[in-house]
Structure formats: structure tokens, C-alpha cells
Amino acid sequence: MHTTSRTLRCLLAVLAAALLLGGCAELPGNRDNGPAASEAEQWFKNGEFDRAGQAFMDIAEGDREYRDHYRLRAAEAFHEEGNLNAVAWALDGVKARRLPEAEQPRLDLLEAELALSKKDTQRALTLLTLDETKLSRPLRLRTLELRARAQALAGDPFASARTRAALNPALQGKDRERNENQIVDTLASIDAEMLKQQAASLLPGDALRAYIDLALRRSGQALAQGITQPGLPVGTQGGANAMNGEGYRPARVIALLLPIDGQLKAVAQAVRDGVFAAYFSDTHTSRPELRVYDAGNSAADAISAYQHAVADGADHVIGPLRRDAVSAVFAQSQLTAPVLALNLPERGEAPPPGSAAFGLNPDTEGAQAAQHMLDRGLNHAAIIAADSDWAERAAAAFHAQFEAGQGSVIGESRLKAGELNFAANIKNALATLPTPSAAGGNDAANPANSGVFISMTPQQARLFVPQLKLAGYVNLPVFATSHLFGGLTNPGMDRDLDGVEFCDAPWLFDAVVGLPHHGDIANSLESARGAGARLFAMGMDAYALVPYLEWMSQHHDAYLPGATGQLGNDGSGRIQRLLTWARFSEGVATPVSGSLQVGAPTP
């Protein structure tokens, strides 16, 4: 997929502006610019590019010694005007050997752009084999952008995406967003299976992996996740001389960036209450100062809050919460205080060094559900999910993980909002299994190596599971994401879910040693009840993670026993959660025997 002309103009304008700031109009040799040349340069700076180009051409006609220099300047002015025909006219007869060495890359870049306009990709790529280490920053950025265009035009989209990924850290704001969208657009033009093969060859932490996943999701697919099980709890080694335990690096001032009003107000309140609950339960020495800043309801608000917090002396930041705000904060040229974001970036980009992204993502639950079924010896699965973004993400992650583990997805179906009769969904998703009547009984209709994965609301699940059994699939095991559990014990309503297993935050079942009991806090704080309990647990974990961020970024086998799961760094700055499994019995959800039971770090 090629870059649109509008996107090109925007990005090239930024690169051109950077080129101007870098300074490129010095006359070679010892001769000073004359009045005419100075006037032309002023017109250039004022944005009168066509006028400047004509003036440079006039000067070139009367100055044989510096003819090529002034024609190059004219070509650069016409380029800013967007007149490639005039660029070609100005460069006619210009020879690189007659230019100083410093000006030759500028000629190559203009010639490369002319070659691209004529679809001569081979010449463009040849001209763009510049030694980037010897180029100024503006020229290096322009080289990468043109090279990415040439590679895409030459039919090598993966190389083009790789080049744009190298360009990305140097861009800011909308220009970075446009470039990231181009990475995804370019990768989306590649066959899905080929994309998956390319992803499999990437080293851990490669920034391109997140963009490949985004590209695959456009077609309802995803990449399989690396589900690790770190074995070394933080804070348990180091002996008596290790203050507060191994890996503990206390913060002095933590800034909490959350919206005070708006659509995410309730979400933010639960997270904030969890952070403060962990703070007041903190028994470590040198407990930090905790300050709250309004992150607002836009990316710009979040950046402003971050800058305000740093100016006030914060040395660590928790938040923001919105995905676009996370991307914006991560995209700043320099993060003087490391950030533990409370969501993944909008376009999946990796956090800057020293920072991390932590979120309650349905993708994680879908992938771990797939692995859980495979570990149980179930290698055939039907997927039935709600018709919503979060359920679709979980379903795509399950599908990718299950097939990566040599499992077979036998059918899929989606439940529409407000729908009550799921007979057609069950029939479509389980079409390859024998019906109870054809099989001669329920046992034959439920092969031992098959199961159902669901991602749906509690209301939908309470209707679906009985209908699945009425259809004859009495013994078919069902596995789910946490979304089917409302967070409150309600045997009367949840008895129909008996036998269903789901992954969830262990704190909801008091499966984490050393943390306050969920029931005790829920009795006192409304934000810790129901579905909000997971967000409350996330706040508790965010506070607990801060002093171990540096250690965990360097020791990927280390984990923190958290309220939302067993927490580790996946090597690319993302906090991975290993969830616990629970099963409904008599309408009550309890941890599955042998499920994750985690201890607490030793102070």
C-alpha cells in the first residue's frame, strides 16, 4: 500500500523544515554570498519558494564558478514549492563532482525523489545508499523517508516498514502518528501467513512485532504471544545487606496521572483508590510522596500533566490511562521521569527505555485461555464471542495462540447485542462435531480433545451455557475470559455457569499471599466491588511495580506476585500478567486446584 500524496506532503514538509533549521545555504569556499544571493535566501526563509528558485537560477547564469551550487539551491526551493518539473530543470547539468562533499547528499536526495516520481525505483535506491552516520539529522530523516517510499514502490513492503520503524523515534506528534499508520498500512499489504512467518523470525523486543500484530488485526487475525512463566520473585534475594530486598529502587516522588472528569472518571477512581490502598499498606522504608495530577481527556492534556509533574519534582510517573495519551507521552523526545503507563500505546509501539506499559488487556486473556486448553490436552476448539471490540480482540488472540500451539479451531460465531436465542450460533460454531442424535449419546457428541472458548458478558454467558447443554453438548468443557464474571458472588444467578473455567485477577479470590483480603476492602470501598475490583487491583499493582521497574526490565525471569496476576517484563517494556484460573461450582467461582497461587515479595 503506497503513501498518499497528502501524507507525503505533510511528512516531507516537516523534514524540509528540519533541513532549513539545520542550515544548508552556506556558499562553498571562502567567497561570501552577494546581495542577490542573500536576498534569495531571505525569500526562501519567508516561504516565497518559487521567487527564491528563480532568483537562484538567475544568479547561477551569471556565476560560472558556483553555478552548480546555486542551481542546487534553486532545485531545493522549487522542491519546497512542490514543483518537481522545475526541480528537474534546475538540476539539469549539475554534477556531484563540482559540488563540495557536504552538498552532494542533498543532490542525491533530490535526484532520488525525481527518480521516484518516474517510478525508477532502482535508481532511487542506488542514490539512497548514503552513509547515514555522516549525515546531519535532517538529511538522515529525509533519507529514511525516501528510502521507505522506494522500497515500497520496489515491492518490498517489509523492508519499507522496517525503514519507517527506524525513522519513527525521531518524529513527534502528528508526524510520528502518520508514520506509524504508514508502517501498519504497508505491513497490511503483505499476505497474513507471510507476515506471521516474518514475525516468527524477529528477535524478542523487536519494535516491528507490535505493528505486524496491528496489521493482522485488520483482517481479524493476531500474532501468538510469548507466554512466559518467570520463576524468580523480586525482593527475595540479596541477604541482610539488601535494603528492602533485591531489586528494590524506591521512588522519591510518584506522580499519578489520571482523569478527574469525563468518560473514564469511574475507571480512574477505581485505579486511584487501588494505588492509595497499596500506598497506605506499604511497609517499606523510605515510602515515596504520592501526588495526583489531572490527566484530562486528551493526549495534549496528558502531556501537560506529565510535564507539570516533572517540573514539580516527580521522579516516577504512573499513568496516563487513555491509549492515545500513552502514545503521546511515550513519543516525547525525552522522558526525564520513567513512566508506568496504565494501558498499552494506541499503535502498539514499545515504551521508551526505562518506562513500561501495564494494562488489563483482553488479548492476554484470550492467549492464556488458548494455552490453558492446550495444556489440558484439548486441541480442537470452537470460539463464540460477543460482537464487541474487547471480545473480538480476545477471540483473535485465542485463535492465533491456539493454532500456534498446533490446535485446530473448528468453528467461530459472534453473539449480537440483545440476542437471546443462541441456537444458530452454537450450531454454526460446532458444525464439525457430531450432533447428539447422530452420535447416539452425549458422550460421543463431546470428544475428549474438544472444548469451547467464550468471551462474553455475564448476561450472555448465563443464557449461552444452558443453551449449549440443551443442544446436547453436556460434557463439552467451556473456558472463558474474565468478562463473564461480574466480580460479585451471586450463586442464584451464576448457578447456570457451573463447570465453566475462566481466567482472572487472583486478588478477587484472595489467591495472593501478603495482600489485603479483597472482601475486607470491598466492604469499605465501593470502587473495589464488582467489575471495578480488577481496576482497583491494577492500581495496587501499579504502585507495587514502580520500585522494581528497573530490575524487572533487566531480569526477565523476575516476577512480582501481583493482585492482577504474576507480573513480569516481557523484554519489550510491557508488563505481562500470568492469570489465575477459577471454576464455577454451585454458582460460586473458586480457584481451580493447581492454579496459580503466588506469594509476596519478602521485604
Image (cartoon, grey):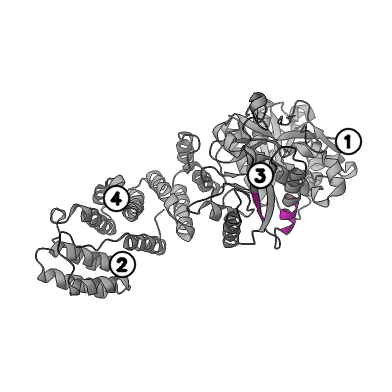
Tags 4 and 2 in contact by the CB under 8 Å rule?
no
Foreground: disc 4 or disc 3: 4
Real-space Cα distance between discs 4 and 3? 44 Å
For disc 3, the neighbor class at 10 Å (few under 14, some 14 to 19, many from 20) is many
Helix, strand or loop at mark 4: loop
Kindly identify the residue that appears in the image at 61 percent across and 56 percent down: 312
Locate residue 425, reporting x and y percent. 71, 45
Foreground: disc 1 or disc 4: 4
On residue 80, the disc is 2
Magenta span covers which residues? 254-270
Query: Quick check: can you spot residue 225?
Result: no
On residue 586, the disc is 1
Locate residue 560, reporting x and y percent. 67, 34
Q: What residue type is labelled 2?
A: Glu
On residue 135, the disc is 4
260 inside magenta stretch: yes
Query: Quick check: can you spot residue 212?
Result: yes
Identify the residue under disc 3.
362
On residue 545, the disc is none
Q: Which amino acid does label 1 sit on?
A: Glu
Foreground: disc 2 or disc 1: 2
Helix, strand or loop at mark 1: loop
